[in-house]
Structures are given as structure tokens and as C-alpha cells.
Image: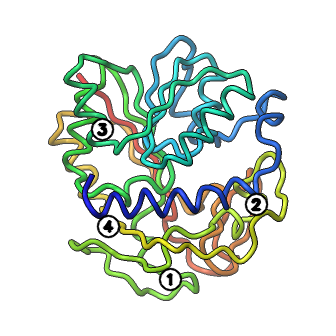
Amino acid sequence: MTDYEEQNRKSWNVATVAHNSHKGDQAAFFRDGGSTLFPEELRLLGDVRGRNVLHLQCNSGQDSLSIAALGARVTGVDISDEAITFATELAAQSGIFVTFHRDEVINWLHTVSAQGQRFEIVFVSYGALCWLPDINAWARGVASVLSSGGRLILVEFHPFAMSFDESWTLKYDYFCPDPIVSLDGVGDYVAASGEGLAGAGHPEGVQDFANPHPSVEFSWGIGQVVTALIEADLRISRLEELPYSNGWKGFDGMEQRDGRRMYRRAGQPAIPLMYALEAAKA
């Protein structure tokens, strides 16, 4: 791994403990038929029964388990040791089978592609692309592990929204070619989002979280993402921009409406906060 990726691994390891402290009894939630998937993911995924699904940057595995519970054969990959350990234990306690791997995703894609492994669906969601140092290598890796006719399903926070700070002040460059270093590291966005990201309940958990490990992010605009996928010979069939974010209350004064969707306050101009993309391999 690069120095950037090693910093992020350490930062995510610490943050993951805090995140899961706010999510209640997740094993019971899944045993009772709970799901962390939002309607956008369910609609794009379609019927996954019997499908071979790869979940990249799967974090602690909640969405991976939700997809597997629909009848898919799921493999999850994440850079964080803590996340993969938690996901593996959660799968065992929930009685839902998922295979998890701890690795940097671009390296993992290269390795399994060379081994001939293929998947019918690659699933990526929510705050994933900003951790990739090379969007073109990622797109090529995704294409290389998709079977013929296989699909990439991407639901992601909109990069334009990431140009604003928490108070909705335009602060960051949309076109930012350099790595973005945060000395505060990965924060406790689960605590800040309340019940939005805690389907199994929202206990108080870790308080006043401070991450001792800096993190490094990368800015990939919509044009860069789309171009990378096209150049990887994937055919884009859907690109949808949405004026809300699912679960994540990342800015001041956001209003939660039906389905745990977070909007700007009434009366404020709507801007894209999230986008959904589907692409297929010929």
C-alpha cells in the first residue's frame, strides 16, 4: 500500500469502532430480517437471487449482509482490519454467509482478475470513491472482474456537495488534482447522523470521538468518474442526480424526511447531494 492508503487504514480502524458503537444490536437486527439498503440500491440491484455479487469498500459489512439476505452470493472487500473483523463476526452472529477480504481494493481487483474470478454485479456505495488514489485504475479493475453482461451499481454522494463545508459555505475546489489531507482523520459521522445510519437502534456509544490518525482523500468529479468507466469499456445506462442524501446528515440544518432521506432546509435552493450510476460490460 502507499503511504496514503496506510494512513487511511489506520484512521478507518479507529473510526470503525466508534461508528459501530452507535448502531445497537446489529446481529439481532439482521436475524429479524432487517436491511440497511435504501430504495435506490434495491431498485438498481434488481433481483439478486443466485447472483455472484462483489461489494467493494464494504466497511463493516452491513450492506453486504443485506444483499446476501436477498439470496446473492456476496464477497466484501475493505481496507480496514477492524471493519473486516467486525463484518466477519457479524455475519457469523447473524447466520448470513458472506466472504470478506481485508485488502486495498485496486490491488485486490488486480489480483483476483489475474486469477480469473468474475462477478455478475459489482456494488459500490456512499463515500467510497473519495478514498481511491486512482479512479482510472479502479474503473479498469472493476471492468476486469465483471463477467460478460455484468453490471456496476454505484450510489455515491455527489462531488459538488463535497465542495461545501458543514455550514454550506463553498470552501473546497471541485477541481482538485492533489490529495486532500485531513489532520482530524475519519470522523464519527454515524453519531452526527443520529438514527439516519443506525437501523438497529441508536445507542449513545462513543462520545467526543477524536481520531489520532490523519486521513487522505481524493476528489473525483462526475466527469472523471464517467470518463474512467467509458475508457474501461463499460456502457453507462443510467446516471441520476438526487437532491437528498440517504442517512447521512453531513451539513447543518438538514431535514430528515420519509425513508431517512436528508434534505436541505425548506426554502434553500436544491443542489445534488447524491447520484446513482449503472454501467454494464459488453
Q: Nearer the viewer, residue 161 or 99?
A: 99
Q: Nearer the viewer, residue 146 or 234?
A: 146
Tags 4 and 3 touching, CB below 8 Å: no
Q: Nearer the viewer, mark 2 or mark 4?
A: 4
Considering the numbered disc 2 on the image, is that residue within a helix, a strand or a loop? strand
Tags 2 and 4 touching, CB below 8 Å: no
Q: Nearer the viewer, mark 1 or mark 2?
A: 1
User: Which quadrant of the structure image shows residue 38?
Assistant: top right
- The numbered mark at residue 257 is 2
Instruction: Say left or right for 27 vs 217.
Output: right
Residue highlighted by disc 4: 219
Mark 2 vs 4, N-terminal side: 4
Considering the numbered disc 3 on the image, is that residue within a helix, a strand or a loop? strand
Tags 2 and 3 touching, CB below 8 Å: no
Mark 2 vs 3, N-terminal side: 3
Residue highlighted by disc 1: 165
User: Is residue 241 in sight in this rendering?
Assistant: no
Identify the colour scheme used: rainbow
- Badge 2 local density, few (<14 within 10 Å), some, or many (20+)? few
Mark 4 vs 3, N-terminal side: 4
User: Which quadrant of the structure image shows residue 219?
Assistant: bottom left
- Badge 4 local density, few (<14 within 10 Å), some, or many (20+)? many
Mark 1 vs 4, N-terminal side: 1
Residue highlighted by disc 3: 236
Residue 183 position in % (x across, y down): 44, 80
Q: Nearer the viewer, mark 1 or mark 3?
A: 1
Rounded to the nearest angstrom, the CA distance separating label 1 from label 4 is 14 Å
Quadrant where the C terminus is found in the figure:
top left
